[in-house]
Image (spheres, rainbow, N blue to C red):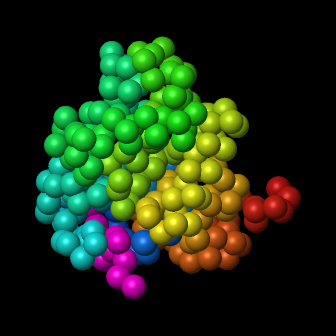
Amino acid sequence: MQPVLAVDHVAKRFGGLEAISDVSLELAPGSVLGVIGPNGSGKTTLINLLTGAYRPTKGSIRVGGTDTTRMAAHRIAALGVARTFQNPRVFTTLTVLQNLFMCEHQGIGRVGLSRLREDAEEWLRLVGLEQLSQRVASELSGGQQKLVEFARAMVRRPSIVLMDEPFAGVHLVIKKVLHDRIKDLSSRGETAFLIVSHEIPDLLDLSDAFVCMADGAVLAAGNPQAVCADEAVIDAYLGAPVGGQG
């Protein structure tokens, strides 16, 4: 089965700093890949490369068989790549419902105007925000804004969603909503997720595979439990085996 995302020996330099070094990974349709590692290891830089915010210095990126290495960000988005941010980026002066309409306004919608409102209202129901649809987004909590951002991404019916620290600092109820929706979409094979997070228990619950990054490179990759038990990962990041002492 062809991967929906293939990263092949990608590197990124900023002047004399090599932020990403020879990173390769694949994302299968409907799978969930957890990306872990210490702060400054290149995880967010990787997402920025995948979305076209940055361009690789070396290597190639393919989305569904299409080479996106030098493609503009809006064209990559139109191929079905969506993202969320560690600090949610919502349109604070718009209502919750209007926020979900913005994907079409920006020319990256995939459903057409005739179905956009129906899908937007359905996604607000799925994330538990239907009663807040007419509330101005600035009035929502940070966790609720993360749900708005997630729903806005999903209205586009993406094949890939890149999530940067979605579980950080959110209420357990909101975390459960995100878990449930990610599990449902991935189990149906509709959407693949790459999730960057320090919340290891959340990633263990969701992920089919892990990648651990350190100093801009892939330190270990594969089965989540095996990656967490890898001595190099423990030394560089975890400090102790998951479930162990210390």
Q: Residue at x 27, y 33 (%)?
A: 102
In the image shown, does 229 or 163 lie closer to the viewer?
A: 163
Query: In the rendered structure, which segment of residues is drawn in magenta?
Result: 1-15
Question: Is 58 left or right of 164, judged from the image as shown?
Answer: left
Asked if residue 53 shows in the view, the reply is no
Prevailing secondary structure of the magenta residues: strand
- Give how far across and how far down residue 185 sits, in percent: 51, 59
In the image shown, does 218 or 200 lie closer to the viewer?
A: 200
Image quadrant assignment for residue 224: bottom right
Question: Is 70 left or right of 86, judged from the image as shown?
Answer: left
Image quadrant containing the C terminus = bottom right
- Give how far across and how far down residue 57 sits, in percent: 20, 64
- Give how far across and how far down residue 21 sits, in percent: 34, 68
Name the outermost residue toward the bottom.
1
Image quadrant containing the N terminus = bottom left
Q: Residue at x 56, y 71 (%)?
A: 209
- Give how far across and how far down residue 109 sits, in percent: 24, 46
Q: Would you place residue 137 above or below residue 19 in this image?
A: above
Asked if residue 127 shows in the view, the reply is yes
The answer to if 115 sits in the magenta stretch is: no
In the image shown, does 244 or 197 lie closer to the viewer?
A: 197
